[in-house]
Amino acid sequence: MNRGSVLVNLVVGVLLALFVGRRAGDAPGDPAPELVDGVDAAAYRPGAPKPVRAAFVVLVRNSDLHGMKQAMRQIEDRFNSRFNYPYVFLNDVDFTDEFKAGTAAMTRANVTYGTIPREHWSYPPWINQTYAGECRQRMHQQGVFYALSESYRHMCRFNSGFFFRHPLLDDLDYYWRIEPDVQYSCDIDYDPFLFMHRRGIKYGYTIALHEYPETIPTLWPAVRDFLAQHPGFVRHPAGLGWLSRDGGATYNGCHFWSNFEIGALSFFRSDEYRAYFEHLDRAGGFFYERWGDAPVHSIAAALLLQKHEVHWFEDIGYYHNPWLNCPQDPAAQARCHCDPAKSAVHHYWASCTHEWPSLPPANVTGNVTSA
């Protein structure tokens, strides 16, 4: 073959390769897309549609600006500067321009601000406010934390039954709750939202504690009454063993500490959960006692979800005064700055944390009120 024929064949080969590349949708010379756990990294650019419809959801006051900026700096440095999930800020009053400017400056991700509807942050008509005030005074005399605070009770009720109904969450499937002043002590190099979506997880936690019994004296009787009316709602009878040491007669106080939670909004929007909340709301304990959203969420998750639908994010280093979750795995410590010896899992008060993963799975419906 002469030199001219070789040159012609070479040119034809190059053109054919370029043609095939274009037919395959690859621009000549462009590198292959960078993948993050099988997802094109371009999806995590600011403003791009994410692989999961999710956001950080934050209930916060204007006065918490600096604590909020600290928490955002932590979550941005450890996770979101690479993943760029949006933030949704909620308040019972309008956010100030100072708060909006200060928080928006902390991230490249989209940020929205919403005001809570008045009917979601007020006394329902069936609550006797005079009696509620007497109850607050009685709890104050007993030394109960936040005994006198009305706003704390409105917050707990809102987080228990209304946050997922806010219009700014209508287009979301998952949320990650963040509060002011929290700290994240480990790099999070994967997408927890995508992790949950792929595995069918509905609720994620880092720390689980025992509740103060004086804040919820009638919560468990109200739950038992609800379950007696709806025994078919229970999807994980073994979850009762996490909530009670005596077969359901009393509540041991175990609850997922809800200042950190990652959840599927479909769980809270379900008919079962909404009926559960409506029953508790009518019982009046949010105002006559001091029912927290943490035990309310947790009892529902333990009984209305199956074991595999609740996940302990053991690998996420998280601190909310006074409790810390710090990974115990030496390999995980390479991306953390927390002290594993100080993790809550070493304390009795947080023993519920590792007791959940030890539960047996169960896929049958049972009646937990028979005890």
Image: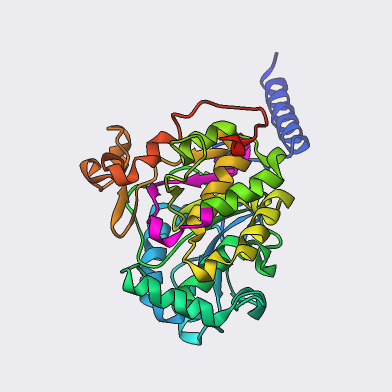
Q: Decide if residue 72 is in sight here.
A: yes
Q: Nearer the viewer, residue 95 or 86?
A: 95
In the rendered image, residue 217 lying in the magenta stretch gets the answer yes
Quadrant including the C terminus: top right
Q: Is residue 205 magenta?
A: yes
Q: How many marks?
A: 0
Q: Left or right: where does residue 61 sit relative to residue 39?
A: left
Q: State left or right for residue 2 relative to residue 335.
A: right
Residue drawn at point x = 38 percent, y = 64 percent: 71
Query: Residue 33: in sight, yes or no?
Result: no
Q: Is residue 42 left or right of residue 353?
A: right
Residue under the image location 46 percent in, 72 percent down: 152
The answer to which quarter of the image holds residue 117 is bottom right
The picture places residue 21, in percent across and down from the top left corner, at 71, 34
Q: Position of residue 316 (x, y in %)?
A: 39, 45
What residue appears at the point 48 percent right and 80 percent down from the top-left corner? 133
**Toward which corner of the image does residue 181 lie, by quadrant?**
bottom left
Q: Against 114, is 289 above or below?
A: above
Task: Look at the image and name its color scheme.
Answer: rainbow
Q: Considering depth in this image, is 21 or 282 the residue closer to the camera?
A: 282
Tell me what residue is drawn at x 64 percent, y 61 percent: 164
Residues rendered magenta in the picture: 193-219
